[in-house]
Image: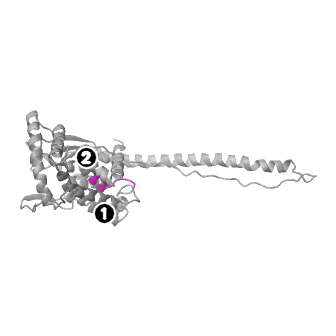
Amino acid sequence: MAQVARALWPVRHAVVWRLGGRPQSALPAQSRAGFAGAAGGPGPAATTRKGNPRLLGAAALALGGVLGLYHTARWHLRAQDLRAERSSAQLSLSSRLQLTLYQYKTCPFCSKVRAFLDFHALPYKVVEVNPVRKAEIKFSSYRKVPILLAQEGESLQQLNDSSVIISALKTYLVSGQPLEDIITYYPPMKAMNDQGKEVTEFCNKYWLMLDEKEAQRMYGGKEARTEEMKWRQWADDWLVHLISPNVYRTPAEALASFDYIVREGKFGAVEGAVAKYMGAAAMYLISKRLKSRHHLQDDVREDLYEAANKWVTAVGKDRPFMGGQQPNLADLAVYGVLRVMEGLEAFDDLMRHTRIQPWYLRVEKAIAEVPQ
């Protein structure tokens, strides 16, 4: 039953474009020449001089408004052009790929991949895998999800591991290298985990295989690249391990979590009923072991809150996302992991008791606004 619940929730996506111009005003120079009245009183020229500032002010205001609108429209069109250029280049590459994602909808690793695919407007088919029988992935010796099949021309590639999938596809979009070549940069290797079980790990999985010019164009500097890699790994090594202990924290929460898993997953009627009650009981007990294994606090909510606030602090107050004006791979990874708790008590508590909600909603909006 532990296999039934590696996850938890749906997706929305997008990019935010800020448009605006700075109004400019121009005040034309004006001659001050005039004639005084013969009796020392104001003559017609003096009267004209009194009226001129008002007329000039109105003219300047109108001219400034016109110039402001012109610059705003020009900036808006330029932003649209840049967006179209980027979308066109990306569409040219992505149209070569036919993607099929094998997933559990409620799996945080699968949610990470969906967040990436949707944010980058990459069309894909979804195959929901039965977490018990796994008949849908019987073709694969790699038995975990997500698995992504990518058809590029005559070449069909299988990509395993959420972070490898994301790194390989981002490398593909930025560099245009054949996906068949890119995959060789992330070789699998066998390793033993802390429990003495053999697992498959992937080399370089947080690294994008770009040349210097491509890396400079994407990141602007080494610090941004290092920061993105660090927090992507943090999402996999720490944040994801806080999900199960929190959504299965109590018997009631475990039952609510499995109610959603069964509703959204691929289960038969009898199989679903068994999974809902037996799975909830099993995961409630397993969550206690996970709490001990990862040295979590007695109240696991505190670890979740600390993690969320740590992330918000890392993003900082001077940028909307860790990626700057747009989410980067770390933003999408953290968002994807947390999103699986939506609709559950743990998610509501997270939004209420931490500073993460504004950032979370910005990422959600950014993904939702991406033209598909």
Label 1 SS: helix
On screen, 78 above or below 127?
below
- Check disc 2 and report the residue beneath it: 114
The one of 158 and 290 positioned closer to us in this rendering: 290
Q: Is residue 158 left or right of residue 172?
A: left
Q: Position of residue 203 (x, y in %)?
A: 18, 61
Residue, disc 1: 227
Is residue 68 found left or right of 180 in the rendered image?
A: right
Q: CA distance from mark 1 to mark 2?
A: 22 Å
Q: Position of residue 71 (x, y in %)?
A: 55, 49
Give the amino acid type for the residue marked by disc 1 in the picture: Glu
Q: Where, by quadrant of the figure, is residue 210 drawn? A: bottom left
Magenta region: which residues? 325-336
Q: How crowded is the residue under tag 2: few (<14 C-alpha within 10 Å), some, or many (20+)?
A: many
Could one spot residue 281 in this view of the protein? yes
Q: Are marks 1 and 2 in contact (CB under 8 Å)?
A: no
* Magenta segment, prevailing SS (helix, strand or loop): helix
| Residue 187 placement (x, y as % from top left) | 16, 59
Residue at 67% x, 49% y: name it. Answer: 60
